[in-house]
């Protein structure tokens, strides 16, 4: 399937900027390029009830978080813990600020965006530990945050989708863990081994995530190839998805992770987890964050907000 004309035009404009592929950069330079690229979009800021930057306790020290409060929030509202994408190496709450704002506004829920530790400075499982700690913190402090502890969802895109699914698995198996009510999984990284059929089909020429980018992420995130067998790094390796909360899985057709998304949705359903899988034709990896520049990004965010609102309010 060819990319949609609107996306092709956007990629041509990006190519004119002369950006380098991520795997040709250092992590520091790749982060800077991503941050600058997001700022260059210069899109209108989505207004919400309030935004607060703070830190919360974590296993490796204080975890920076950004909390988005919906307009007219009342005590006992639903909440989403959101994990940004970026291969566990790049990205931040800043790069995904517009996503968090859109979900907060349109779903009418509190959004806790987590600035988890990343590789190579803090390798696996640091990101997992921070993500789970942040989710548990929100659950444990639900009353103080004006949140109903039984209506907390987890979500994220790419590496963030990976962390959301892993957090759900950890919560399921923890007797004292948070009660996760819903999952928003946007083209999640399911197995850092890679090499699925869509790596060959969409590995070059379909946006910033290339087949050569995954090994770059993997080498900076994981300690050694032995980590590939750990389901906390590659949730496709988990023994079972049974008992997980309902999920919306959003995938992009022209994405090297498209095969992994289909496999994840099928496995969730096979293990008895209600899963709605929506594949956006002609879209690439990372499209979800590109609203309002892409109509399909707007539609995907609206869909996610609708499902979160229905599940949590």
Image: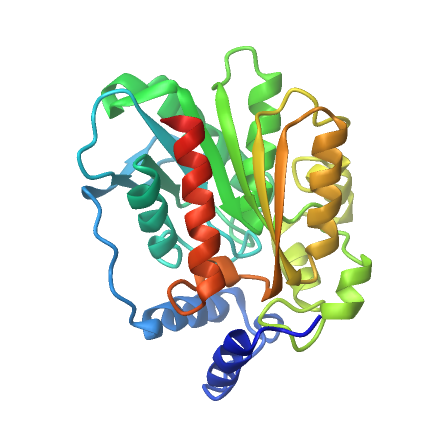
Query: Can residue 5 be seen here?
Result: yes
Q: Vertical placement of 298 versus 118: above or below?
A: below
Closer to us: 135 or 12: 12
x and y percent of residue 79 in the render? 36, 31
Closer to us: 89 or 278: 278
x and y percent of residue 267 in the render? 75, 35
Q: Vertical placement of 230 versus 160: above or below?
A: above
Would residue 139 appear left or right of 223 to someone viewing this image? Answer: left
Q: Vertical placement of 15 versus 117: above or below?
A: below
x and y percent of residue 63 in the render? 37, 38
> Based on the displayed image, in which of its 4 quarters is residue 305 positioned?
top left
> Based on the displayed image, in which of its 4 quarters is residue 145 positioned?
top left
Query: Can residue 130 be seen here?
Result: no
Q: What residue is drawn where x is 32% and y is 32%?
A: 56
Q: What residue is drawn where x is 35% and y is 36%?
A: 62
> Based on the displayed image, in which of its 4 quarters is residue 53 positioned?
top left
- In the rendered image, which quarter contains the C terminus? top left
């Amino acid at each position: 399937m060819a990319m949609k004309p609107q996306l092709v035009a956007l990629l041509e404009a990006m190519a004119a900027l002369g950006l380098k592929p991520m795997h040709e950069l250092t992590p520091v330079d790749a982060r800077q390029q991503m941050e600058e690229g997001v700022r260059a979009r210069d899109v209108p800021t989505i207004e919400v009830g309030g935004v607060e930057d703070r830190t919360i306790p974590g296993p490796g020290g204080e975890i920076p978080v950004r909390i988005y409060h919906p307009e007219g929030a009342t005590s006992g509202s639903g909440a989403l813990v959101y994990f940004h994408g970026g291969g566990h190496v790049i990205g931040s709450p800043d790069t995904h600020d517009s996503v968090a704002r859109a979900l907060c506004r349109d779903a009418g829920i509190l959004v806790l965006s987590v600035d988890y530790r990343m590789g190579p400075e803090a390798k696996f499982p640091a990101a997992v530990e921070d993500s789970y700690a942040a989710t548990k913190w929100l659950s444990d402090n639900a009353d103080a945050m004006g949140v109903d502890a039984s209506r907390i969802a987890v979500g994220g895109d790419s590496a963030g989708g990976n962390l959301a699914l892993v957090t759900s698995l950890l919560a399921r198996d923890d007797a004292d863990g948070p009660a996760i009510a819903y999952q928003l999984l946007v083209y999640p990284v399911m197995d850092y081994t890679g090499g699925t059929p869509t790596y060959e089909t969409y590995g070059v020429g379909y946006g910033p995530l290339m087949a050569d980018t995954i090994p770059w992420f993997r080498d900076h995130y994981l300690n050694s190839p032995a980590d590939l067998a750990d389901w906390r790094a590659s949730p496709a390796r988990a023994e079972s998805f049974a008992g997980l909360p309902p999920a919306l899985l959003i995938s992009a057709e022209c994405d090297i992770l498209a095969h992994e998304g289909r496999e994840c949705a099928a496995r969730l359903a096979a293990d008895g987890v209600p899963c709605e899988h929506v594949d956006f034709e002609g879209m690439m990896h990372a499209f979800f964050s590109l609203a309002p520049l892409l109509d399909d990004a707007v539609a995907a965010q609206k869909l996610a907000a609708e499902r979160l609102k229905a599940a949590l309010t």
